[in-house]
Image (cartoon, helix red, strand yellow):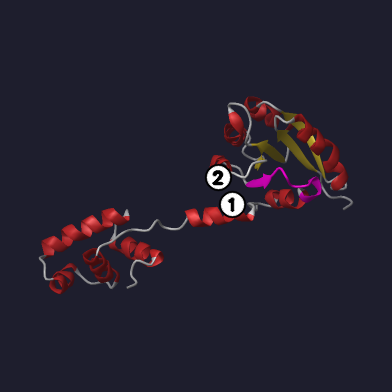
Amino acid sequence: MPGSPVVRLAVVDDHPLFVRGLELLLPVTTQGRAEVVGSTGDASAAASLVSRCLPDLALVDLHMPPPGGIRAVAAIRRTTPRVRVVAMSGGEDTAPALEALRAGAEGYLPKTAEPEELLPPLLAILDGWAVLPGPLLRMLLRAGRPAPVDLDDEERAMLRAIAAGRSTVEIAERMHVSERTVKRMTAALLRKLRVSTRAEAAAVAGHAGLLGD
C-alpha cells in the first residue's frame, strides 16, 4: 500500500542462506513494506546489533551456538525494550519457544513459513498482539490449567463443606470431630491445594472439578 510505513527488521540467525533469502525476498513479497536493516550470526552480538540499527522487530533463531537464541532474546529485551522480539525455529520442539516467550519474545514463527506469509503476523505483533502457531497456543493453554490434586474422601468432604461456606463449628458437627481437628485438617488441605485461604481453596477446587462426585 502506498504510504504504508516500512517494517524494519533485524535478523539474528547463523544460517547465512536463510538471512540472505529474507534480505532478497521480503521487500519483493511485501511490496516494499518490510526490509532487513541488519543481521548477525552471533547470538552474543544480538543486543548490540539491535541497539545500533534500532529496528521495529528483531527475528531471533532459537537454535544458535552459545550463548544461544534464548539468551539473545533476553539481552535484546533488556537493552532495547521497545523493540519487539519474534522467536523463530526450524524444529518442531515447542520447549525452546516456551523459553523464548518467558525471556520476553512477543511471538513465535516457524522458519518454514514463506516470506510472503510473514508480513501479517509481523504487523500484528507491532500492533501489540502475541502471535503463536496453533499447537504452541494449545500447549500454553494446557499448561495454564491447574494440576490435578488427588484427594481422599475425607478431604473431599472437607472441601465441599468449605466451598459451601460452612463454619469450623458446623464442619466439626457434620464430620463428628473436634473443632481443633477441623482446623488442623483445613490447614493441611490448604497446603495440599497450594493456597492460603478458604476462598482460594474453593475457587481452585471448583475450577479443577474437584467438587464433583
What amino acid type should be assigned to the residue bearing mark 1? Answer: Leu
Residue 74 higher or lower than 34, as above or below: above
Element class at badge 1 = helix
Residue 126 higher or lower than 10, as above or below: below
Q: CA distance from mark 1 to mark 2?
A: 8 Å
Residue 98: mark in rendering: 2
Residue bounds of the magenta highlight: 107-117
Question: Nearest the camera: 100 or 76?
Answer: 100
Q: Which image quadrant is residue 135 in?
A: bottom right
Question: Nearest the camera: 175 or 170?
Answer: 175
Mark 1 = which residue?
Answer: 136
* Residue at (72, 48) in percent of width and height: 122
Q: Earlier in the sequence, mark 1 or mark 2?
A: 2
Q: How many marks?
A: 2
Residue farthest toward the front in the current orientation of the protein: 92
* Residue at (22, 56) in percent of width and height: 187
What amino acid type should be assigned to the residue bearing mark 2? Answer: Leu
Q: Are marks 1 and 2 in contact (CB under 8 Å)?
A: yes
